[in-house]
Image: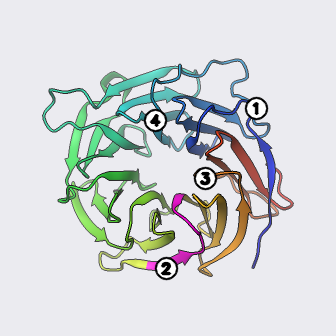
Amino acid sequence: MSLAFLHAHDCAEPHTDAVWGAAWTPTDNVVSVSADGAIKQWASSSGQRHPPNAPFPAPHALGLVSLSVAPDGTRALYNSIEGLTCLWDLTNGEVVGRFESYARGVEGAEPSWSVSLHPQAETYAATGGAGNVTIYSAKPDTFGQRVASLASGRSKFGMFCQYSPDGKRIALSTETGQIYIFDVEAGALTTTYTSHALSVRSLAWSADSSLLLSASEDKRLVLHDVRTSTGGSVASFTGHASWVLSVDISQDGRLGLSGSADKSIKIWDIGARAAVSTVQDTGEVWAVSWRPKPSAGGAGAFVTGGEDGVVRWWRGAGVAV
């Protein structure tokens, strides 16, 4: 099987530096964060800012490195290079939470690098230099209050963390290639994967929370079945010529999506364990995200962001964005 994907359109007002995160929301908008310190929201049908005349939050002095959007598309959590975490209400444009995780004087505190909202958006998970996961309140009135800490037992820089869609697990990846799975209710580490030889840059859960797809600087993607503690990797996907920087899984679980430093985007048939489409971009592809809503008559649509600061929409042949 091979699939054709076409460039649909670009955002109307590109970022002035690399896009380091992008998420296509259930409300059919896209949120992007950039090394220029800005977070923006776009209408997917046109690439115009959304809402049309609403201001975006003031750009941060330093780059924004992590983005997580609530499943209902109403809030976006984002984090800066030095660890300033903010919660943006996408319905009214207000920043309703702000926490300086880098502030000194708090026992056990460390600057957050990667952040992830719980599916119900009541808490968020964060990781950083110590390679552990800290869970904080995401409620506006208590935003940033520590709720729990989950220790990996290894002092390795936490590159990426993400709640599973059912909220029962948190996956954490490190600079040296390990992936840790935590049971949220038990507050304990349950599984460690050593599937990669180099830093794992991105993780994506399947919609049913059973599979985890990882993207690494070793040029590979690896699929894991988290339902078994001893299962390890289910499949390895190769084909990128450089670091794999971003990854996602389609809502129906059939297709994987990856962006790479080799300036390409690949679509993977997960069942067949093979790439079914390759799209060339203009630079390193730091962010990829499938459209959450199913598309009739084709393979769907996705959005990307990368080195040139442009958010781009792509559609399967015969599918309207």
Q: Residues within 10 Å of mark 2 (few under 14, many from 20)?
A: some
The residue carrying mark 1 is 12
Residue 164 in the image: above or below residue 56: below
Question: Which of the two discs, 3 and 1, labels the residue nearer the N terminus?
Answer: 1
Q: Amino acid at mark 4?
A: Tyr
Q: CA distance from mark 4 to mark 3?
A: 19 Å
**In front: 202, or 15?**
15
261 relative to 110 in the view: left or right = right
Q: CA distance from mark 2 to mark 3?
A: 23 Å
Q: Position of residue 25 (x, y in %)?
A: 61, 43
The residue carrying mark 3 is 285
Q: Amino acid at mark 3?
A: Val
Q: Amino acid at mark 1?
A: Ala
Question: Which of the two discs, 2 and 3, labels the residue nearer the N terminus?
Answer: 2
Name the residue located 25 percent from the left edge and 56 percent from the top edge.
156
309 relative to 318 in the view: left or right = left
* Quadrant placement of the N terminus: bottom right
The residue carrying mark 4 is 78
Residues at badges 4 and 3 in contact (C-beta under 8 Å)? Answer: no
Q: Residues within 10 Å of mark 3 (few under 14, many from 20)?
A: many
Question: Which of the two discs, 2 and 1, labels the residue nearer the N terminus?
Answer: 1
Q: Amino acid at mark 2?
A: Ala
**Corner quadrant of residue 142:** top left
**In front: 263, or 208?**
263
The residue carrying mark 2 is 235
Residues at badges 1 and 4 in contact (C-beta under 8 Å)? Answer: no
Q: CA distance from mark 2 to mark 4?
A: 31 Å
Question: Which of the two discs, 1 and 4, labels the residue nearer the N terminus?
Answer: 1
What element does badge 1 sit on?
A: loop
Q: Nearer the viewer, mark 2 or mark 3?
A: 3
